[in-house]
Amino acid sequence: MLLCGLLAVAVGATGLAVASQAGRQATPVTRSRQPALPPAGPQAAAPEQAAGARVAAPTRLVIPAIGVTTPLIRLGLTPAGSLQAPASATVAGWYTGSPRPGAIGSSVIGGHIDSRHGPAVFFRLRLLRPGNQIYVRRADGTIAVFRVYAVQQYPKARFPTGSVYGPAPGAQLRLITCGGTFDPATGHYLGNIVVYATMPGRAGRQRPR
C-alpha cells in the first residue's frame, strides 16, 4: 500500500514533513462524518511547569468534531533518520521522540490524509477550528483533553520546525498530515497541515509561525 506519509525529521528547516505517496489527490469531502463521542474516563489535570512526573503513554486518539477515533501506534526513526510513517492509513501514530500527550512540551501525532484506497485517518484534519476539543486516552485510563487554537498550512520548504518541535509552555499537542496543492506529476502534496492544541492550564499557548 502506498500511503500519504513520508514523515521526515531533520535538524534544519525541514522539520516534520508529510508527503503524499497515494499517487492521486484526496477525494473531496462530500458528506459529513458522524461525530465521534468524547471518551469516558477521568480527565487528567494539566501539569505544572515544574512538575517532573512521567505521564502514562497514549493509546487512543478521539476528535469528535471530525469523527476520528483511532488507536495510537508508536512512531520512531528509520535508520536514515526519518520518522516512521504509520503502516496503515487507518491509524495515527505518536512520535516517541516527543513528550507524551499531557506532559510539558509539544507532543507530536502524525497520520495519513489518504491512500490509493481512499481517505485516511487525518483526511478531515484541515476542517478543525479553534475551540474544537481533542481527546487522548492514556494507558492508565486517564483522558488528556486538548483545545485547538490554530490550524495552519505550510509549504514543505518552509515547515516550521521550531513551532512544531520546539519548547512549549504547558502541555501542547501537534497533529500533522499532508495537504495543500496536489502535484499529479509526482503524486505528492506540496504542503503540510498542522493543528496546534493546548491542554488548558496555567501556562499560555504559543502562537504558531
Image: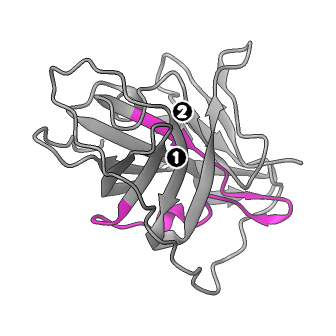
98 lies left or right of 32: left
Residue numbers of the magenta segment: 107-133
Residue at the disc numbered 2 = 16
Q: Counting residues from the N terminus, which is met first, the one under dot 1 or under dot 2?
A: 2
Residue at the disc numbered 1 = 176
The answer to whether residue 160 shows anywhere in this view is no
In the image, residue 52 above or below residue 162: above
As measured in the structure, the alpha-carbon distance from the residue carrying label 1 to the one carrying label 2 is: 8 Å
- Tag 2 secondary structure: loop
Q: Going 62% across and 87% down the picture, which residue do you hit?
A: 31
> Farthest residue toward the right?
1
* Amino acid marked by disc 1: Ile
Quadrant housing residue 133: bottom left
Split into 4 quadrants, where in the image is the C terminus? top left
State the residue in front, 170 or 17. 170
* Amino acid marked by disc 2: Leu
Q: Going 80% across and 61% down the picture, which residue do you hit?
A: 24
User: At which x and y percent is residue 96?
Assistant: 54, 25
State the residue in front, 120 or 72. 72
171 lies left or right of 141: left
| Category of crowding for the residue at label 1, using alpha-carbon neighbours closer than 10 angstroms: few (below 14), some (14–19), many (at least 20) | many
User: At which x and y percent is residue 192?
Assistant: 54, 48
